[in-house]
Image: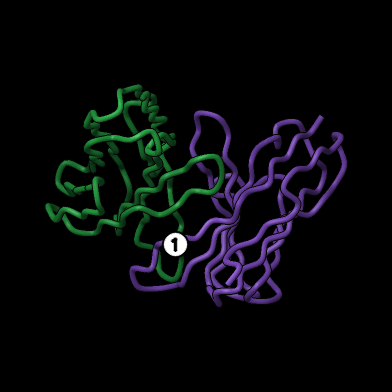
Chain colours: A green, B purple
Amino acid sequence: EDKVVQSPLSLVVHEGDTVTLNCSYEVTNFRSLLWYKQEKKAPTFLFMLTSSGIEKKSGRLSSILDKKELFSILNITATQTGDSAVYLCAVGPRIQGAQKLVFGQGTRLTINP
Amino acid sequence: NAGVTQTPKFQVLKTGQSMTLQCAQDMNHEYMSWYRQDPGMGLRLIHYSVGAGITDQGEVPNGYNVSRSTTEDFPLRLLSAAPSQTSVYFCASSLAGGNNYEQYFGPGTRLTVT
């Protein structure tokens, strides 16, 4: 059974701190790993990772994938209160013609001023 | 583009009632899916479709039906609502094939079954 586990489940830090969110997975025929940010409503796309060791970066957010150890991390530097959200990790198995994503439980990040 | 739209935003049902959650997208995406999100459990796939006339079951399909008569619309039917179906429901769409796994999500429908 395909499985995605995120840690920690909850994290509270002060504005300006750097945080690292973890995502490990067990998926047959891995294709890609995605990170989403969810504030009060729909998840919004952050990154898609398909190759090991290649960092994806967007402003203060960055992510990297390790396909040998089956995990990914999402880093946020110089955190701001607007970064408070649930961060979801999802893995897409290699299935012909379909894009079934398996999601982790999410990490609830709270940034205090 | 409106993106992915869902109606209604909120719904309260009594046990045993049926209803349809609507989902539409205007991006000409082949792939559409329905997820439910419960506290502490992330999103779980209910049903998905890779194109008009083609649907398949996801991880938690029991109690739900879908159909895909057009590329744009993908309604989710609850046949006989149960309290265990109280959840937030998200519809998503994306292009099919290749590495196009970026799924665009609708705003969600919060369903309560009493």
Q: Where residue B109 appears, x then y in whole percent?
A: 68, 46
Image quarter of the C terminus of chain A = top left
Give whichever of A37, B61 is nearer the camera: A37
**Residue shown at the point (40%, 54%) measured from the top left:** A45
**Residue shown at the point (66%, 37%) measured from the top left:** B87
Horizontal arrangement in the rendering, residue B61 relative to residue A39 (left or right): right
Tell me the quarter of the picture where residue A54 sits: bottom left
Q: How many marks?
A: 1
Asked if one can make out residue B13 in the rendered structure from this viewpoint, the answer is yes
Q: Where residue B38 appears, x then y in whole percent?
A: 58, 34
- Secondary structure under badge 1? loop
Give whichever of B72, A32 is nearer the camera: B72
The residue that label 1 is drawn on is: A99
Q: Where residue B99 appears, x then y in whole percent?
A: 33, 68
Give whichever of B57, A51 is nearer the camera: A51
Asked if one can make out residue A29 in the rendered structure from this viewpoint, the answer is no
Image quarter of the N terminus of chain A = top left
Q: Is residue B38 above or below residue A43?
A: above
**Residue shown at the point (43%, 36%) measured from the top left:** A85
Q: Please give the chain letter of the residue carrying mark 1.
A: A
User: What kind of residue is marked 1?
Assistant: Gln
Mark 1, Cα crowd under 10 Å, few <14 / some 14-19 / many 20+, is: many
**Residue shown at the point (65%, 75%) measured from the top left:** B53
Horizontal arrangement in the rendering, residue B39 relative to residue A90 (left or right): right
